[in-house]
Image: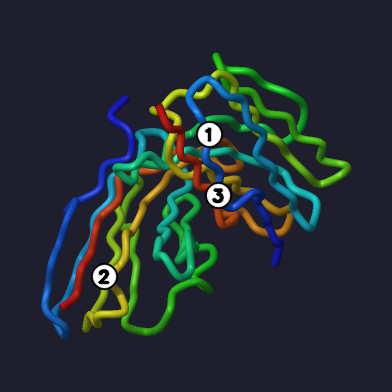
Amino acid sequence: DAGVIQSPRHEVTEMGQEVTLRCKPISGHNSLFWYRQTMMRGLELLIYFNNNVPIDDSGMPEDRFSAKMPNASFSTLKIQPSEPRDSAVYFCASSLIGNTIYFGEGSWLTVV
Amino acid sequence: GIQVEQSPPDLILQEGANSTLRCNFSDSVNNLQWFHQNPWGQLINLFYIPSGTKQNGRLSATTVATERYSLLYISSSQTTDSGVYFCAVLDTGRRALTFGSGTRLQVQP
């Protein structure tokens, strides 16, 4: 199994630019999660989907963040406009509902 | 929301030593997982253990759901065990994992 695949692995962008992070979950999984990891706040849930439907987006920091899951094999997390405080590692994860959650390798975002 | 507390926050061991990491949680849970984040940032599943005891090589875990804690045991530690160990729980109301702040382990040769 290929595991959860995220892209890009690393991105450096200038403040104000749009950032799009991509995720391909494990085939057959029906839950998808976006987490953010920072030194100050640790690992925090941003949003998750069940069967492509957003269930809980209460962790999305503000309107600059949006996430979509147009089909079972693809999701995006978009930040527009980006700010330096958005610098973090963004993880995508997937699972069968209620079962073991598997993480991708993360997208390391730096906004300068 | 559910609170997850891990202890100790930091741990330094000599190679070959044993250790116990603890995770306390504030409410009933349907799911508990232990992860290892290696020095390259990868989050690796160790155990899916909402209750009972499991073992995988030198690692084992026990969750006592009624008393709201879980323990991760590492025996005969190796330098490759270094990294951060996270406990994450799925509370009965929410269907996504809430993470503790982790235990940072350093195993010295």
| Residue at the spot 47% in from the left edge and 59% down from the top edge | A43
Identify the secondary structure beneath mark 1: strand
Q: What chain does badge 2 belong to?
A: A
The label shown at residue B10 is: 3
Q: Amino acid at mark 3?
A: Asp
Q: What chain does badge 3 belong to?
A: B
Marks 3/1 same chain = yes
Q: A2 or B109, which lies in front? A: B109
* Residues at circles 2 and 3 in contact by the CB criterion of under 8 Å: no
Q: Nearer the viewer, mark 2 or mark 1?
A: 1
Horizontal side of A27 relative to B95 (left or right) equals left
Q: Residues under labels 2 and 1: Cα distance? A: 41 Å
Quadrant (top left, top right, bottom left, bottom right) of the N terminus of chain B? bottom right
Q: Amino acid at mark 2?
A: Lys
Q: Amino acid at mark 1?
A: Leu
| Residue at the spot 40% in from the left edge and 58% down from the top edge | A34
The label shown at residue B13 is: 1
* Residues at circles 2 and 1 in contact by the CB criterion of under 8 Å: no
Give percent across and percent down for residue B12: 52, 40
Q: Residues under labels 2 and 3: Cα distance? A: 34 Å
Q: Which residue is mark 2?
A: A78
| Residue at the spot 28% in from the left edge and 50% down from the top edge | A23
B79 lies above or below A42: above
Identify the secondary structure beneath mark 3: strand
User: Crowding at label 1, few (<14), some or many (≥20) Cα neighbours within 10 Å?
Assistant: some
Q: Residues under labels 3 and 1: Cα distance? A: 10 Å
Identify the secondary structure beneath mark 2: strand
